[in-house]
């Protein structure tokens, strides 16, 4: 299954196993979940949230560095 | 029947104790929180920190250092909520325009608009007006002169910002300078002071920062308070988003240096061992009295800079050394 993810102004198509959680997709992209928040279909969701076909994820980088 | 269907279709993402869909999974306490309970928990934490450390008292005039980013905007928002209706406490905000092309103008515009919405007085000070040049111009000079020992823009920026903020707060009659420093900033600072062996700087850390660890307050140095020091950066960001605050999310183009390595190191540990940032800060807070004892003998004397007259630990303060000499 392919999920569309936007991150840092770019769109990515990520291949994942069936019904992954948000955190699985972040892991696949090499993104530390501690540094981002994720919107699924426009709503903020926990990184344990499941992702299905047709879902669109937007990954927001929220950690700056003081 | 309806309830059964709802249960079957319930995703594994998690539900809040109130039954609403969660927006956040707080791994270090094993909880799921909906928008309402998440925001409530952040406000409670900030209020608890303020109360526990007597950060604010009647008669205070609080200056919030506002960049327009998530941390300072959220702390100003919460303070304006907490202090709403308190006639005995005054709140205002100050922003610094360092002069970073393509980055700062937008955030300053957001900061000014945000203060207008909250009904909070706001002022902006610029490096250009105070030091005769912007940060971009200064870094141009540094790039052209290989003999200049300090080459990191964050050093010039941080020193200049702290100086102007303290001066502005004092000249405006502020009794406290409030910053949006969060748990991540504090845990990074603990690590960096340890790595650099800077016991004096470590000894001055804590929820309320004053010039001296001996409590000999200097009237020219405005004590700093950090109501978010026990709230992770990611949660401050989520609070700002959920509250719909208009915030500037871009990252400064000048980022880099050892602080960012410390940030990544801590975030990698946090992902594996939830709660590690709290442990770093809690352990430091427990050790702080001992660190202060060790540092006390080596505390530099409080002087006045011979150029600008501001508090300094040497004949010429760091700001004048970097920006005026």
Image (cartoon, rainbow, N blue to C red):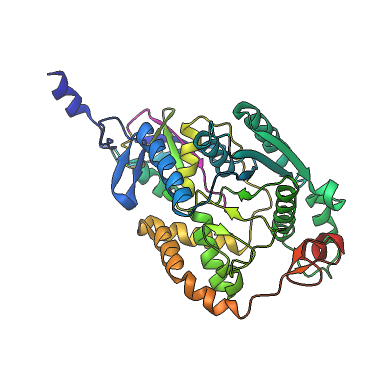
Q: Please determine whether, in this image, residue B34 is positioned above or below residue B268.
A: above
Residue plotted at (20% across, 24% down): B6
For the N terminus of chain B, the image quarter is: top left
Residue A66 % position (x, y): 59, 53
B36, A38: nearer the viewer:
B36
B60, B280: nearer the viewer:
B60
B193, B164: nearer the viewer:
B164
Residue B65 % position (x, y): 64, 45
Residue B16 % position (x, y): 28, 36
Residue B101 % position (x, y): 76, 43
B225 vs B286, left or right, is right
Residue plotted at (62% across, 56% down): B223
Q: Is residue B250 visible?
A: yes
A7, B77: nearer the viewer:
B77
For the C terminus of chain B, the image quarter is: bottom right
Q: Please determine whether, in this image, residue B84 is positioned above or below residue B128.
A: above
Which segment did they paint magenta?
Answer: A52-65
Instruction: Identify the residue at the far top of this view.
Output: B2
Residue B107: quadrant of the picture: top right
Residue plotted at (72% across, 61% down): B152
């Amino acid at each position: 299954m392919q999920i569309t993810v936007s991150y840092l102004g770019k769109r990515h198509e990520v291949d994942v196993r069936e019904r992954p959680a948000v955190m699985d997709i972040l892991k696949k992209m090499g993104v530390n979940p501690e540094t981002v928040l994720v919107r699924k279909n426009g709503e903020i969701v926990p990184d344990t949230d499941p992702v299905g076909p047709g879902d669109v994820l937007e990954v927001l980088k929220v950690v700056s560095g003081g | 029947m309806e309830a059964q269907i709802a249960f079957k279709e319930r995703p594994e993402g998690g539900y809040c104790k109130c039954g609403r869909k969660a927006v956040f999974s707080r791994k270090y306490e094993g909880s799921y929180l909906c928008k309402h309970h998440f925001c409530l928990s952040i406000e409670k934490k900030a209020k608890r920190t303020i109360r526990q450390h007597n950060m604010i008292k009647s008669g205070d005039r609080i200056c919030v250092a506002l960049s327009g980013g998530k941390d300072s905007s959220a702390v100003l928002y919460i303070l304006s909520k907490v202090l709403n209706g308190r006639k005995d406490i005054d709140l205002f905000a100050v922003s610094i325009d360092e002069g970073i092309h393509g980055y700062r103008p937008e955030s300053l515009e957001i900061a000014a608009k945000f203060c207008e919405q909250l009904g909070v007085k706001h002022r902006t000070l610029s490096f250009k007006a105070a030091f005769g040049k912007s940060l971009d111009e200064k870094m141009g000079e540094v790039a052209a002169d290989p003999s200049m020992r300090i080459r990191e823009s964050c050093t010039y920026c941080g020193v200049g910002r702290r100086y102007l903020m303290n001066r502005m707060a004092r000249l405006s009659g502020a009794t406290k300078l409030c910053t949006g420093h969060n748990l991540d900033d504090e845990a990074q600072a603990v690590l960096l002071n340890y790595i650099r062996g800077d016991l004096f700087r470590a000894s001055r850390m804590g929820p309320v920062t004053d010039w001296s660890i001996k409590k000999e307050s200097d009237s020219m140095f405005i004590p700093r308070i950090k109501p978010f020091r026990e709230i992770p950066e990611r949660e401050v960001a989520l609070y700002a988003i959920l509250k719909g605050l208009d915030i500037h999310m871009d990252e400064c183009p000048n980022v880099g240096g050892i602080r960012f390595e410390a940030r990544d190191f801590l975030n990698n540990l946090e992902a594996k061992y939830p709660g590690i940032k709290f442990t770093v800060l809690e352990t430091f807070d427990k050790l702080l009295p001992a660190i202060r004892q060790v540092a006390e003998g080596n505390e530099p004397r409080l002087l006045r800079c011979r150029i600008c007259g501001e508090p300094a630990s040497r004949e010429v303060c760091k700001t004048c050394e970097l920006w005026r000499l």
